[in-house]
Image (spheres, rainbow, N blue to C red):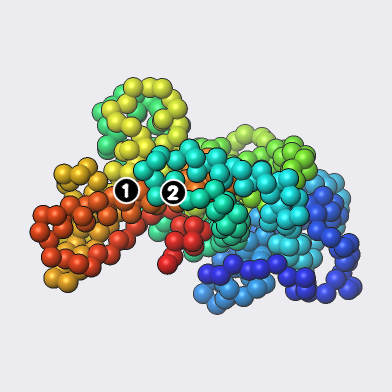
Amino acid sequence: MRIKPSSWTPPHSYEGLPVLPRPPPGRSFAALASRVALFGRDGVVDVGSRMLWHIWDHSEKLDPNELGTAIVRAGALPVIALGLMFGSAGIRPCPTEVEFRLLCWEFHNLPEFAGQDWAAARQERDEAKAKLRELPSASRLSSLPQQAAGEIRGLWVRGKVVQRQLQCVGVRVSDLVRAALIYEQLRHLMGGDANANFRKLEQAYFRTDYRLFVRAALTLLGAATQAGGAGHTPGRVDIGAGDVRDEYPTDVGVDDMLIVVDILGCSVADFPRLGQELLRLPDWEVKSSPLLWQLLARPILRLDDYPGPDACIAIPSPWALLAGVPNLFLSEFVSFLKCSGAPLPVDPEGARGDAFDHYLEKSLTNVVGLARVASSNVGKRPDFLWAGDAYAVAIEAKVRVTPGSDLGLSSIRSIIEAWHRLCEAIDQASAYCAELRAQGSALERWILVVVVQEALTATAFNMSR
């Protein structure tokens, strides 16, 4: 996958469009918000959902690197969010497909960084310098000169663009299943049903069995996948109606699906307030602000507030739902455990790392000669080692390197923290390699592989080479 640069040439002509005029000179978030407000709220949601589900349904035929497809994939969710924030709930026209594509293009061309605002740029560089000073003295990054802050800022902007444009690209059902398997091991390490404190916290958070939660999420995805027939909007589901109850006769009940909606959902009524908060931000902070990406963190949109089995929801992006469930299990719930203050048998974050190690160990069972590294005299070691006659491969496992509170890299501190965690993996393998050489190992060539559960690590953090 490749990121797409800004372009001054629109992908379609504005001439003859029913509502959307040619944009005025300059690029500002307030201007884009006012242009989205020309349309009805529900129309923006419906057209955006239809286009995302079309890409999902035809993913084998569409080129993900084609400019139009890539810009819609990257911009549809925030444009839908803008429609919910600023679009009219009354009678307003529905955007055409071309108008929606142009709105995605206009969002794509909003500024990514402070640019000519020298005070803001200086503040970002100062933040980078402060973070470098806070790192442990043993960190590889602590030796970077303070003058490197400018280059760090450039790499951070690139990382933000990668996270925004490519997030959820390539997400599959198997990613959700893998997260469930890792969580199953995490649960075992935390004591599972045998530990009363953990079981109480798990029940309070998920309100149902975790396996049933996963099946309910997949049932909603299946119902949304089938919802694009004649007279139906893709991604729109009436829970309790025939499109869920009759088409998918599983052990999942309406109450189970409503729990998933309650935990992974957000209400239409929340968005106008978020929009007003966004308008107070500088333009270059908008594109990576969590306020704008609410539908990524909470990918199910509650279309009404009344309870009961006939509640209507929209799932604008199937990829967002498949990414949201793993994030819930392996990030949000782990943070919930850590902040609970309840006595638990092990540290939740440490148990999450161990759970990922166990998952990898089972996945690599058939690799002949691969062994788990149990101990080291220097205290640092990789998780797994494969040694041949001419070279060895050290494998270090990390669930994630991005701070859980800033998945979109909205702060320059976050990319430095991610680099620091990746450098820790290099240090662990290097120390262990030096120990083996001191013991007489003849291996001269070492290859380090860092396996990360988090997507886009190599691309976003410039670690691919």
Name the residue rendered at 19%, 62% in the picture: 386
Q: Please say whether residue 360 is visible from this viewpoint.
A: no
Q: Which residue is mark 2?
A: 143
**Which amino acid is tagged 2?**
Ser
Q: Amino acid at mark 1?
A: Phe
- Is 205 placed above or below 400 here? above
Q: Measuring from the top left, give residue 298's x and y in whole percent.
A: 58, 44
Where 24 sits versus 305, above or below?
below
Residue on which the image places disc 1: 356
Decide: few, some or many residues near mark 2? Use Cα within 10 Å; few <14, some 14-19, many ≥20: few
- Report the quarter where the C terminus lies: bottom left
Q: Nearer the viewer, residue 333 or 357?
A: 357
The image shows residue 319 at horizontal and vertical percentages of 54, 57
Please state if 341 lies on the left or on the right of 12 as rendered: left
Q: Secondary structure at mark 1?
A: helix
From the top left corner, tell me how far across and down residue 116 is, in percent. 76, 55
Relative to the observer, which residue lies in front, 238 or 112? 112
- Residue 133 lies, with reference to residue 27, above or below; the image says above
Q: Are there few (<14), some (14-19), or many (20+) residues within 10 Å of tag 1?
A: many
